[in-house]
Amino acid sequence: MSEEARKRCPYCHEEIMAAARKCKHCGEWLEDPPTTSTTGSFANPETMVSEALSEQYEIERELGRGGMAIVYKGVQRNLGRAVALKVLPQGMTHDKKLLERFHREAKSAAMLSHPHIVTIFDEGETKGVHYMAMEYLTGRDLHEIVQESGPVDPGEAVGLIAPIASALGYAHRNDTVHRDVKSSNVMVTDTGRPVLMDFGIAYASSESRLTQTGTVLGTPEYMSPEQARGNEVDARSDLYSLGVVLYEAVTGRLPHTGGHPMSVVYKVLHESYTPPRQLNPDIPEWMEQVIAKCLLKDADERYQTGEELAEALESEDPGEAVPIPTASSGDGPATGPVELGDDGNGQPSKTQVFRNEGDGAPEAPAAQDGDVATDTMPSDDDPQTSTAEPDAATQRQRLRIVRSLEGSADWVNAVTFSPDGQYALSGGGQDNIKLWEVVTGNEVQVFNDLESQPISMALSPDGEQLVSQSSSGGIQLWDVASGDLVRTLAEGSEAVLATTFSPDGKHVLSGNGNDGSLCLWETATGKEAVAFDDHMEAIFSLTFSADGRYVLSGSGQSGKLSLWDASSGAMIRTFEQGDWEATYVFSVAFSPDGKYALSGSDDMAARLWDVESGRLLRSFKGHSGLVIAVAFSPDGQFALSGSSDMKVRLWNVDTGQLSYVFDGDAAGVNAIAFSPDGRYILSGSKDSNVHLWTP
């Protein structure tokens, strides 16, 4: 199966879905935005900025866009001085907390005067435009240099990193912690001067994107372990991040990477990394020691000040020796997983979350509280059970809620993301469905006049249509942009409690009548296209395989999990084996590659199945309530389960290990969904809220 097409936002350069109309990272529209009563119409950003700042500055051209700001080259009129104007996008100016931090930290950063810290001349707000004026520099950032030219010579790296370490030391003495030190924030001017950028917006950008609770998570690959845990950070966290920058500069790679943000966070917390000299033999031993000391998990064991790190680099003396980690043992806890390099073909190897036993790895901890963990897929006749309690040895970290999308008056029965990940939808009380903007948490659209409370919904692959299933059995098709009802596909289909779109968006799969019959409807006409074989019992859950060949359904009477041929409507097989004792299959999911099926049921377990053979591969046990919702991560490496026990759990598909517990829902979890890029998770629960989570 081919991966979803992706592209880079032309403004902030973050990766987004190819079909995205608006960047979920910087909030900028990639085409003319829709005009609605909530969002209104947007003027051309550059024209708006130019007009608002015209008395003080002349805007010459746009220089680029970062994750949370637009940068223009301008001229300060009264001094005739070239400046770089950093402006918050209009899509973020409604966030009062972000604005407060932006201006407060800008003023704090303006107090810093150091040759290797960008100088801030002015900051303020004019006619709704929030800006920061700073010295205009020409050059390239260090990340761009490494990407284009490969690793930097170790001697040159000292000349770039030591001044930044000194600059951080100066900032720390002045009570300013950067919190987002990374190679793209180190500008190397045309004259070779390294300058640390983005003082003053690091806090603001992080808060907007990742938290509203005071916990700041920067860029995962550069985060210190204490920052990854959400703990209070100090100067030593910045020095850890600078150690990552040094590692990247001299090896051309990052210490910790992964296709999934949660995997990266876990690696930062628990894994070792490939020693730099294994990647680049030209790196001197003393520099490898410096890097190792910067990257120690314990902040007390690292360099304590920027000046100390600068001195170690300039004198080529790392100080007291520290152990150099290997690919099979790290400086974290003995239970940490093996650090993986590439697969021998220059490609990153598959992400793993937990250490495999053997191969020289430290002994894994004994199972506790009934935990059973397997390292490989079970044999054909040996399905495995994986169980874990919150306090078990395999439990690593509890994730926190980024924000709650409030406003539902009753249970939230369904949640989903738009195909580009910019929006979230929730269906619950008041007989309506709400559309939210993920970056801001703002309500954008409301779909009213549903026949009754929504219990299931899905977005078309292009994000332009919504199908809903009401508790009364009505199946309705909606226009997303306007919120208007397009047509009603069926009425009184109370025995089928789910509906979804085919992968090509041409059909809607749902019930027809009150006997549990499945039907494919043409999206364009509303006509019945395919009637599935008689099922004659309630169906609680439905999903399509990504290639559109198969349909998976979960029964609400016999506990059957059934596989159907989507083109003919014929049943192919039922999945029944082993400890399968369920009566209700509340939720089902296909893995992205279509190889596996996932089910959640009333016997407090989620199960992984082989689609081709119908064999039960493993059971994920540990919930103390009904498993009402399941989902796969976009890369297929993780399985997600949500339960009436108020917990959402993330499991490693390959090993069955419990990776994370999402602990924060005040009532049972009815629905869960991964964002298309795997960065966020939505949960809908009986506490009337939709919760957005991230590592």
Image: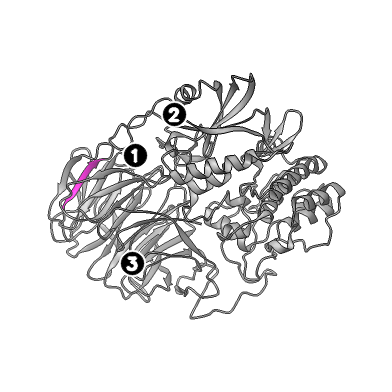
First in sequence: mark 1 vs mark 3: 1
633 shown above or below 486 = below
**Left or right of 415 in this view: 311:** right
Q: Which residue is mark 2?
A: 127
Residue 274 numbered tag: none
- Would you say the residues marked 1 and 2 are in contact, meaning their CB atoms lie under 8 Å apart? no
Q: What residue does disc 3 label?
A: 667
Residue nearer the viewer, 577 or 124: 124
Give residue 582's quadrant in the image.
bottom left
For the residues labelled 1 and 3, say whether their Cβ atoms are less than 8 Å apart.
Answer: no
Numbered disc total: 3
Q: CA distance from mark 3 to mark 2?
A: 44 Å
On the image, the x and y values in percent for residue 192 come to 76, 32
Element at label 3: loop
Residue 65 sits in quarter? top right
554 relative to 59, above or below: below
Q: Quadrant of residue 139?
A: top right
Q: Which residue is mark 1?
A: 462
- First in sequence, mark 3 or 2: give its number: 2
- The CA distance from mark 1 to mark 2 is 36 Å
